[in-house]
Image: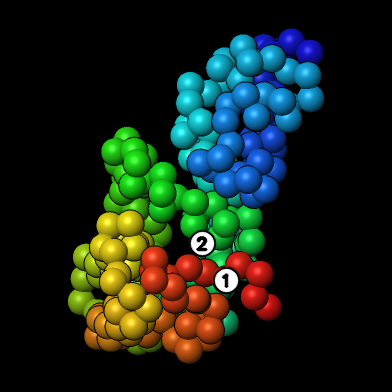
């Protein structure tokens, strides 16, 4: 199969192979040669035609999984729920995808070891996610379900708390008790922002360990 004849198909084969290995072995334990070996006879040259590094594959894969889920598009235009409820549903929809949740956990050691990966991660938080959450927050302000004054700033702070401040590779917790304290304090701050989304239902899907908070992706 020519690597250039069907570029979209080739890229999909690479992403499928990488996803299988990242789920089975983990990102750190998977090599580019492992991925090539799962590509159904395609060569290493085909891999490098589409991706320069394993890290690049990882972020292309998380982007694809997110686009497949696309909670914001699923909730866009719904009039039966308010802005706050849409944010809660967004978090719920993302947590329900086991593959996406597993890869989100694998981001932790990746961004710890790679400044480039951390930069990419933060850029996604700062641009795409901030604007999407800001739209829902503004909708909640307008319908009265969210008590906040500045949608964009509120979205930025919400994402910093949930996706950076609670990240154990950036702010290590000494033990399980401290990890729970951090989670509870995050809940208090988010509640104060007018976004009471870190509720008991979400807490039941989170396991606190000495390394920090992780989502129990297999929990029903």
Q: Residues within 10 Å of mark 1 (few under 14, many from 20)?
A: some
Q: Which residue is mark 2?
A: 72
**x and y percentages locating residue 22 in the rendered image:** 61, 44
Q: Quadrant of the C terminus?
A: bottom right
Up-down relation of residue 90 to residue 7 (above or below): below
Mark whose residue sits in front, 1 or 2: 1
Q: Disc 1 designates what residue? A: 216
At x 61%, y 67%, the residue is: 217
Frontmost residue, 184 versus 9: 184
Q: Is residue 146 visible?
A: no
Q: Quadrant of residue 77?
A: bottom right
Task: Please report the residue visible at 58 percent of the width from the left and 46 percent of the height from the top.
Answer: 26
In this picture, residue 88 sits left or right of residue 194:
right
Q: Residue at x 34, y 41 (%)?
A: 113
User: Can you say whether 17 is above or below 130 in the image?
Assistant: above
Say which mark, if any, is on residue 36.
Answer: none
Which is more N-terminal, label 2 or label 1?
Answer: 2
Q: CA distance from mark 1 to mark 2?
A: 23 Å
Q: Which one is in front, 170 or 83?
A: 170
The residue carrying pointer 2 sits among few (fewer than 14), some (14 to 19) or many (20 or more) residues within 10 Å by Cα, namely some
Is residue 55 at all visible to an observer of this figure? yes
Q: How many marks?
A: 2
Q: Residue at x 57, y 31 (%)?
A: 31
Which percent across, then down, holds residue 99? 63, 55
- Residue 164: percent from left, percent from top: 30, 60
Q: Is residue 58 left or right of residue 120?
A: right
- Quadrant containing the N terminus is top right
């Amino acid at each position: 199969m020519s690597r250039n004849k069907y570029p979209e198909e080739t890229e999909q084969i690479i992403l499928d192979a990488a996803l299988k290995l990242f789920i089975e072995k983990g990102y750190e334990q998977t090599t580019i040669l492992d991925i090539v070996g799962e590509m159904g006879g395609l060569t290493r040259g085909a891999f490098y035609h589409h991706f320069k590094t394993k890290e690049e594959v990882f972020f292309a894969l998380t982007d694809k999984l997110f686009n497949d889920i696309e909670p914001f598009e699923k909730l866009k235009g719904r009039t039966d729920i308010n802005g706050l409820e849409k944010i809660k549903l967004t978090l719920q929809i993302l947590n329900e995808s086991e593959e996406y949740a597993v890869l989100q956990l694998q981001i932790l050691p990746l961004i710890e070891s790679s400044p480039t990966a951390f930069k990419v991660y933060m850029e996604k938080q700062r641009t795409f996610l901030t604007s999407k959450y800001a739209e829902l927050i503004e909708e909640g302000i307008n319908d009265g379900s969210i008590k906040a004054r500045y949608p964009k700033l509120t979205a930025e702070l919400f994402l910093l708390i949930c996706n950076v401040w609670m990240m154990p590779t950036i702010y290590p917790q000494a033990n399980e008790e401290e990890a729970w304290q951090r989670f509870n304090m995050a809940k208090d701050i988010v509640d104060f922002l007018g976004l009471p989304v870190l509720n008991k239902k979400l807490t039941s899907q989170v396991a606190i360990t000495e390394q920090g908070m992780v989502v129990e992706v297999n929990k029903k």
